[in-house]
Image (cartoon, rainbow, N blue to C red):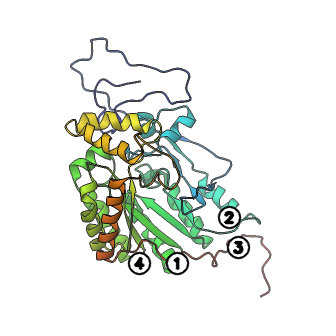
Amino acid sequence: MSFSSKPRGRAALSNEAGRFEPYAVVAVEDGWEDDEPPPVLRTEVTDETPRSIITRNTSPDISFDRSINPYRGCEHGCIYCFARPSHEWLGMSAGLDFETRLIAKPAAPSLLARELRAKSYRPDVIAIGTNTDPYQPIEAERRIMRQVLEVLRDHRHPVAIVTKGTLIERDIDILSEMARAGLARVGISVTTLDPDVSRKMEPRVPAPRRRLETIRRLSDAGVPVRVMVSPVVPALTDHELEAILAAGAEAGAVAASWIMLRLPHGVSTLFREWVAEHYPDRAARIMGRVRELHGGKDYDPEWGKRMTGEGLFAEMVAQRFDVARRRLGLATELPALRTDLFAPPARKGDQLTLF
């Protein structure tokens, strides 16, 4: 389904059927709505009760082997989000459905507590926010992420969080307690410092200046923070790399990382529509640079290359990042989180130890 005009407050311009769907619904102009504004798309939330909550992966270019996603879909609506195609597995679109038809997992805390108590479980860092943002707007009401953090704190289990959401400040009490024990760290993604670019590209994400303030507040509370220049958008935001790193360091970040723009599956079509709408003067240049990074394609999923791209431009970005990072004293790796403190809390009726 395509929309004849841009839906207000959303990044995607279309809602094409997912790649697994046999049929598509297409909007047709009937001549009666030419003078009417486009409809406001409200966010819908449906609850899901999965059988398990810890997701495992064996990807060789990812630093963690387990993660938790309290939500499917993301109201932040970042046009470049590589997680958009995951909505197609639910029979929905990677476009506007991903931003407006969300799935919440209210049973996540209880499922997590059960899985952490399994006799076969061996602790290692759980990553949260690697697919969709746990601090997207609906978390203010649902509070699933906070309950997940409470379970991890009570089990003394390490966690690494990635977010663009300033709502994480609500949970500084838990995160600072865990950080003091070497059990928590946070990555804050800052794609651009330009509020106009950010509003077009990430329509429901807090402004860049506000995210920098979140870095400051977390850092002041003793939580190790990484500033993440993610993604670097060629010919649109790549010139800001050094400025973003400097702003993150000034706010208190102690480490940094970067990831090149990734456009898997339908994200490529959505991004091309978006860049043609908002930056028609440079759309060809942006997409040309993207294809240069991926061997002439919009995206290459090969492990070891998908995060950075390849070629002269990719090498230049990597070198610029490294020079700026060193100059600012930012690390690439944070100290390892502790796993030796892991201990499920006693429950009523449990046999007490004698020693």
Q: CA distance from mark 1 to mark 4?
A: 10 Å
Residue under pointer 1: 182
- The answer to whether residue 265 is left or right of residue 29 is right
Q: Is residue 47 visible?
A: yes
Badge 2 crowding class, 10 Å Cα cut-off, few under 14, some 14 to 19, many 20 or more, is many
Badge 4 crowding class, 10 Å Cα cut-off, few under 14, some 14 to 19, many 20 or more, is some
Viewer-nearest of labels 2 and 1?
1
Closer to the camera, 276 or 46?
Answer: 276
Residue 26 location, x and y as percent? Answer: 42, 19
Residue 79 location, x and y as percent? Answer: 36, 42
Residue 91 location, x and y as percent? Answer: 55, 31
313 versus 350 height, above or below: above
Residue under pointer 2: 116
| Amino acid found under the numbered disc labelled 1 | Gly
Query: Tag 3 or tag 1, which sits nearer the N-term?
Result: 1
Residue under pointer 4: 222
Query: Tag 2 or tag 3, which sits nearer the N-term?
Result: 2
Quadrant location of the C terminus? bottom right
Q: CA distance from mark 3 to mark 4?
A: 28 Å
Give me the residue at 52% from left, 55% from top. 144
| Amino acid found under the numbered disc labelled 3 | Ala
33 versus 135 height, above or below: above
Residue 189 falls in image quadrant: bottom left
Marks 4,2: beta carbons within 8 A: no
